[in-house]
């Protein structure tokens, strides 16, 4: 059993590393593309917030069957259910890590959650049969390929169009920033609060009602708006910078708002998606130690530490590739455009989390960037890059499932030969 525990830790680190390389980079991609942050600073900020989200509120109890893809009763009733889950979860971690590493090397932003879901569905299908798969849940997840980018893209178009008409297309954009800026600050802080309450802190069981959340975030937003109003009155144009780029002074303020939104998304992501790596690992370690197979398994703090550390290393080494795709290759971004994209993604995450819709952070951010590009005109988009990204989304679940089937039989044979299960 020591071998199984050691192997699960290694594979959990591998999966966490791949999550950091691909999914984490999404949150900071627009900030890098708009030049609000350098890649080095984006990696540092994301590393701190992702690790904090993963370790502090990553969930000390996590579902062993991620996303409800397998029918727990079917698994528990199977005479070899425990052995199947151990081999299957090892396979799911390996398949997820492998696919995400390949996607990251190619600069493809794909969904971590969909990768692990496809992997679990794959081994469940061959080991337990069709009856063990929750096909309705799989259908709901597949629907997010359309829901996430459409919703976030629509919001991004609206936000950027309003910003352009209220500020950028006016004769004195700096004066308009002083006028409208506090409202933007209010909106950003309110949405950051909602993201944190509904997604970033949900593992702490802080079950705020919608009314309570609106009241708390509204109060924080009002304070932030008041401070911003005072500071913006001191804002003065930078003639040298504005000669080089007419909106330099305006973009500086939006760059700050954009980074604030990105930080909220990074924290929320770390608190939630670390479970994609540590959930299967916790299940294997628990059962290898003799615990009964359960729908939920306790997660010791050291496992959260492993997951958080793996995410940070992956982000630091390979994350720049996906950042470049999100921030530079889909469409050209400035802080105002990046702000619209990041804000739209955050709003979509809030709405989806509250309604229980299975959306992907990746899909939200990519859809928002597409929306900003469309608001500028269809010619502002690189459809070759977009086509590649959409193809990567579509194949994620079947590729994860296929890889998991292969690795399931590999681990089953290995563990049977060693007598480890």
Image: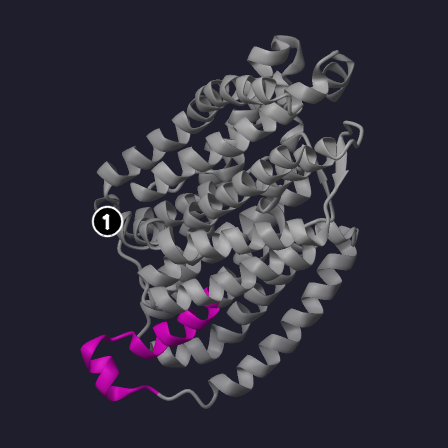
Q: Is residue 158 visible?
A: no
In the rendered structure, which segment of residues is drawn in magenta?
237-259
Q: Quadrant of the C terminus?
A: top right
Residue shown at the point (62%, 55%) measured from the top left: 305
The residue nearer to you, when weighing 331 against 286, is 286
- Up the image or down, 296 lies above or below 267; here it is above
Q: Is residue 169 left or right of residue 64?
A: left
Q: Residue 58, position in %: x, y?
A: 66, 51
Q: Is residue 240 magenta?
A: yes
The residue nearer to you, when weighing 356 against 237, is 356
Q: Is residue 76 magenta?
A: no
Q: Residue 61, position in %: x, y?
A: 75, 44
- Up the image or down, 257 lies above or below 223; here it is above
When asked about the image quadrant of residue 218, the answer is: bottom right
Q: Is residue 49 visible?
A: yes
Q: Which residue is mark 1?
A: 380
């Amino acid at each position: 059993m020591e071998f199984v525990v050691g192997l699960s830790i290694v594979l959990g680190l591998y999966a966490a590393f791949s999550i950091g390389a691909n999914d984490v980079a999404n949150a900071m991609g627009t900030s890098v593309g708009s030049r609000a942050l350098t890649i080095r600073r984006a990696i540092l900020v994301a590393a701190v917030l992702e690790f904090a989200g993963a370790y502090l509120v990553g969930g000390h109890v996590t579902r062993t069957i991620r996303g409800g893809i397998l029918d727990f009763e079917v698994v528990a009733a199977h005479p070899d259910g425990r052995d199947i889950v151990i081999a299957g979860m090892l396979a799911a971690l390996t398949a997820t890590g492998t696919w995400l590493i390949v996607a990251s090397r190619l600069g493809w932003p794909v969904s971590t959650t969909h990768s692990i879901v496809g992997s679990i569905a794959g081994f469940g299908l061959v080991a337990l049969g069709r009856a063990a798969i929750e096909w309705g849940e799989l259908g709901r997840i597949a629907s997010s390929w359309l829901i996430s980018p459409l919703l976030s893209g629509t919001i991004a178009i609206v936000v950027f169009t309003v910003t352009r008409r209220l500020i950028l297309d006016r004769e004195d954009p700096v004066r308009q920033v002083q006028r409208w800026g506090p409202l933007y600050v209010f909106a950003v802080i309110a949405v950051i609060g909602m993201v944190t309450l509904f997604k970033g802190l949900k593992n702490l069981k802080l079950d705020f009602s919608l009314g309570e959340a609106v009241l708390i975030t509204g109060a924080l937003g009002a304070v932030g708006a008041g401070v911003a109003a005072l500071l913006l009155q001191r804002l003065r144009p930078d003639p040298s910078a504005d000669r080089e780029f007419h909106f330099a002074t305006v973009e500086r303020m939006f760059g700050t708002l954009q980074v604030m939104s990105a930080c909220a998304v990074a924290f929320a992501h770390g608190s939630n998606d670390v479970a994609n790596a540590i959930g299967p690992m916790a299940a294997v370690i628990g059962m290898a130690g003799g615990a009964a197979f359960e729908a939920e398994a306790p997660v010791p703090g050291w496992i959260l530490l492993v997951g958080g550390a793996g995410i940070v290393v992956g982000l630091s080494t390979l994350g720049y590739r996906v950042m470049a795709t999100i921030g530079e290759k889909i469409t050209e971004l400035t802080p105002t455009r990046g702000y619209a994209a990041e804000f739209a993604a955050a709003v979509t995450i809030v709405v989806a989390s509250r309604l229980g819709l299975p959306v992907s952070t990746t899909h939200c951010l990519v859809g928002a960037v597409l929306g900003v590009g469309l608001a500028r005109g269809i010619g502002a988009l690189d459809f070759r890059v977009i086509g590649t990204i959409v193809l990567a989304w579509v194949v994620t679940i079947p590729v994860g499932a296929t890889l998991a089937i292969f690795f399931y039989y590999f681990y089953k044979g290995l563990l049977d030969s060693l007598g480890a299960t």
